[in-house]
Image (cartoon, grey):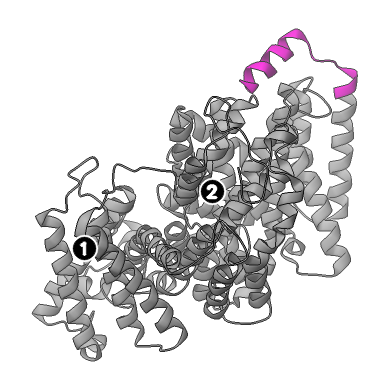
Amino acid sequence: MKNGTKTTKTSEEEGLLSEEDLKKAEEGGGDDSSTRFLSGWIKYAFTIIAVIGALYHLYILNFNPIEPWVFRTMHLAFGAILGFLLFKGVKSGSNKVTIMDWLLIAATIWVTYYIVSNVSELLFRFGVSPQPMDTITAAIGVFIVLELTRRTSGWTLPILAGVFILYVFAGPWMPGIFNHGGYSFERFVTYIFGVDGIFGVTLDVSSKYILLFIIFGAFLQMSGVGRYFIDFSFSLAGGMRGGPAKVSVLSSGLMGMMNGTSAGNAVATGSLTIPLMKRVGYQGRFAAATEATASAGGQVMIPIMGAGAFIMAEVTQIAYAEIIVAATIPALLYFLSVFFMVDFQAQKSGMRGLSRKELPSLKGVFKQAYLFVPVILLIYLLLSGFSVIYSGSVAIVACMVISWFTKEHKMGPKRVIEALETGMRNTIQLLAVCACAGIIVGVLALTGVAQRFSSLILGIADTNMLLALIFAMGISILLGMGMPTTAAYAVAASVVAPGLISIGVETLFAHMFVFYFAVMSAITPPVALAAYAAAGVAGEDAFKTGVQAFKLGIAAFIVPYMFIYSPELMLFGSTGSIVLAVVTAAIGIYFLSSAVQGWFAGKLSSALVRVLLIAAAISMITADWMFDVIALAIAAAAFMIQKVKKPTTLDKDKVEQEAS
């Protein structure tokens, strides 16, 4: 590794990756059979369209705001045209752009022209009294969105959207809370392809915030800041016990917060960290699970939270700065838990870290600390009350300026063009996902089923508040399975959050609760996308990796209950109460990690110790000193049993089996 640091061995057998591998990791993990290798004039056309698209967005956002529907239509048009050029119709299909692709591109241009040239009339006609051409255009547009999403993200989300579309017409025959009067095709398709559906809040966030920060992420890569994050993580944690796993936790948190998709981040950083984890002794399944869990955690990491914070701000109308401040402690607790998990595993297996000579030199890393300036500047501007768009745009410029102080990554016109192209390329998938999620959100609003879910949750809460929260958790995870974070949260926020608010949960707490479980659907079997992506990198069984990732991320299923019952964890309350809540929550996380990993001052001596540790962790959920005392007493009992009863041979065998 270079970039102002000591050069290291780079062979695959040695476990460290080459510069080329690192570049692939930064750009998304290498080849993908669903994308084309563009060449010739099509490659140049793609670059020109992508750069124009990126500059168009930056110009409109910063200098010349236009009609929102027109802007979002142009946003979708750029994404669809680029998507049909880049993504194949079928995996491992022809590398050439086919007739079908050109037809889809032509249809995209027609739909865009129709909306832009008739927008003032369509605002009043769509979804109310559409004309025949309105219906045809909207139907073509819906098909374009579904096909683009299928190509970029697979079948899961389009199938789910298809189920919701069928529900619109099957409503009169549905039982109970799912029954509704039904809608004509003309009204449905124009409503969905309007500002209440596809062009609603999800695509609004994509056009303004997601694209902006993906371009920011591309500039971080090109300026060397992205690589510096990885070097910094290696220098700081690589030499620790089981160091590469801790590097995975740190680097995935830093890179994942700007990625917007847990699975994408798992492949990107995992292609570097998973081989290194295996080298120091972690089994492939555990290494893949660690990367998946850390990548999912990147979606809750401040200040960007994988773009989820922007959707939350738009939906709730709560200030962005307030959201990221409130999200700080829960995010740190999550990563603290994952850190404990990998450390306990390292202790159980007697692992060591990488030697100092194999790591970037501390001196070289600290010399380049100025590379943190764009991120620090971004956080400062956001917390100072500047708009998200202004803050992100300044941070993009800061990346370019900072690069001029480096030798290897100085950004001239060529690298700026490459960064703009990469930003637009990386936006395509999330843009498609947000547009498709808009179909589901639109159906929920059109049929009123979301309000009926709220009534159902309210009815459960009348019996038991905890039961209502568990029900809300289950629905959020179920709706999020197989979907990227942004889509998972957007759908869950429409269905579940209003119900939690109706039972008295504060708006910010309700949405944060839903957001956490939407994120964790990426590591929750049977459809755990982040775990499956990491398993592919490691060459491990996907389902078993998902189960392991679920175990490692178990704290994320506890943290939301902690901040619901202890608002101090979202920085509400006096300084003393906040400090106490944070300390006791951290202790509770430690107990839970010990129970899951079977390590508490040594290997657990019996199942009773595990049960006691889980009980102690649960007792720490609420910020009540009586429960805290009870928890500490239970933990003390577990410690005494642990010291008195040494592990038997059978226990040792069981622990070793769990570790493997």
Q: Kindly check if marks 1 and 2 are in contact, taking CB atoms under 8 A apart as contact.
A: no
Give 201 or 335, whichever is nearer the viewer.
335
Which secondary structure dominates the residues rendered in magenta? Answer: helix
Quadrant of the frame with the N terminus: top right
Q: Quadrant of residue 527?
A: top left
| Relative image position of residue 587 (x, y in whole percent) | 81, 45
For mark 2, give the secondary structure. Answer: helix
What type is the residue that disc 1 sits on?
Ile
Region rendered in magenta: 642-660
Q: Is residue 79 magenta?
A: no
Q: Quadrant of residue 41?
A: bottom left
Q: Residue at x 87, y 29 (%)?
A: 639
Give residue 285's mark.
none
466 vs 159, left or right, is: right
| Relative image position of residue 176 (x, y in whole percent) | 35, 58
Please name the residue that numbered disc 1 is placed on.
144
341 vs 44, left or right, is: right
